[in-house]
Image (cartoon, rainbow, N blue to C red):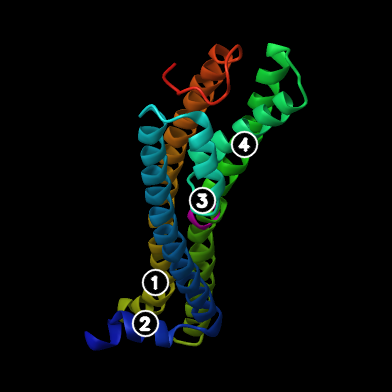
Amino acid sequence: MNQQDLSILHLVLSASIVVQLVMLLLVGVSIASWAAIFRKIFALRRIKALNENFEREFWSGASLNDLYAAAAQNARSAGPMERIFASGMREYQKLRERRIADANTLLDGARRAMRASFQRELDAAESNLSFLASVGSVSPYVGLFGTVWGIMHAFTGLASLQQVTLATVAPGIAEALVATAIGLFAAIPAVVAYNNFARDIDRIAIKLETFIEEFSNILQRNLGAAPAAAPGH
């Protein structure tokens, strides 16, 4: 058995059909995992940028009515923080149009609307995380299944030989171990990405919850005035 016979490509092509199917499945899962990772990277970067832009505009002194009009006009391109603000402001204005003057009713309605919007935004930000978690936890076991099957197949083929040496055992074992290597190749990036994304989403969630509290305080201070008052007042 020469060096070329033990190349990765040769080991994959020489593996049994079951092991090859396992490898093909893991490669497909790895490609899908990397695609999900890159989509999530760009999505979270966009969320952070939109939130920061709206937060700067919110605290710049613009009136709540102007901010609400801009949020309604740019609903599709708005970020999570802007959509949460719009949902709270929308409910607040609806209640005032009904001539509800009770401060607790106004605040509770706005806060409920913002909490519901917050949950929707959080669910959207967490999309595909469950897929990455599944890839990270299941892929090594799928690869291990391919390895076990490959080793069984290799030893079954050696049963008819009268003399078994390391040279006859090594290729079959190496073919089987490639499945475990591919499983780890698929799992490790998924686990690392999942942990990083979960941490980033937690930070985004904390920032949004802080904004909800700050905006609620602003509404409470402005209950006796027109809702178009500037955020800083």
In front: mark 4 or mark 2?
A: 4
Among the two numbered marks 4 and 2 on one chain, the one whose residue lies closer to the N terminus: 2
Residue 74's disc is: 3
What residue span does the magenta drawing correspond to? 133-137
In front: mark 2 or mark 3?
A: 3
- Residue that mark 2 sits on: 11
How many residues crowd mark 2 within 10 Å: few (<14), some (14–19), many (20+)? many
Q: Answer yes or no: do the residues labelled 3 and 1 have beta carbons within 8 Å?
A: no
Residue 124 lies, with reference to residue 222, above or below; the image says: below
- Name the residue type under label 2: Leu
Residue 103 lies, with reference to residue 114, above or below; the image says: above
| Magenta span: chief secondary structure | helix
How many residues crowd mark 4 within 10 Å: few (<14), some (14–19), many (20+)? many
User: Does residue 70 show up?
Assistant: yes
Rendering quarter of residue 232: top left
| Residue at x-position 54% and y-position 66% | 145
Among the two numbered marks 3 and 4 on one chain, the one whose residue lies closer to the N terminus: 3
How many residues crowd mark 1 within 10 Å: few (<14), some (14–19), many (20+)? many
In front: mark 3 or mark 4?
A: 3
| Residue at x-position 57% and y-position 23% | 227
Camera-nearest residue between 71 and 164:
71
24 relative to 48 in the view: left or right: right
Residue 5's disc is: none
Where does the image place residue 58, in percent across and percent down from the top left? Answer: 42, 31
Q: Answer yes or no: do the residues labelled 4 and 2 have beta carbons within 8 Å?
A: no
Residue at disc 3, secondary structure? loop
- Residue that mark 4 sits on: 87
Q: Answer yes or no: do the residues labelled 4 and 1 have beta carbons within 8 Å?
A: no
- Name the residue type under label 4: Ser
Q: Answer yes or no: do the residues labelled 1 and 2 have beta carbons within 8 Å?
A: yes
- Residue that mark 1 sits on: 178
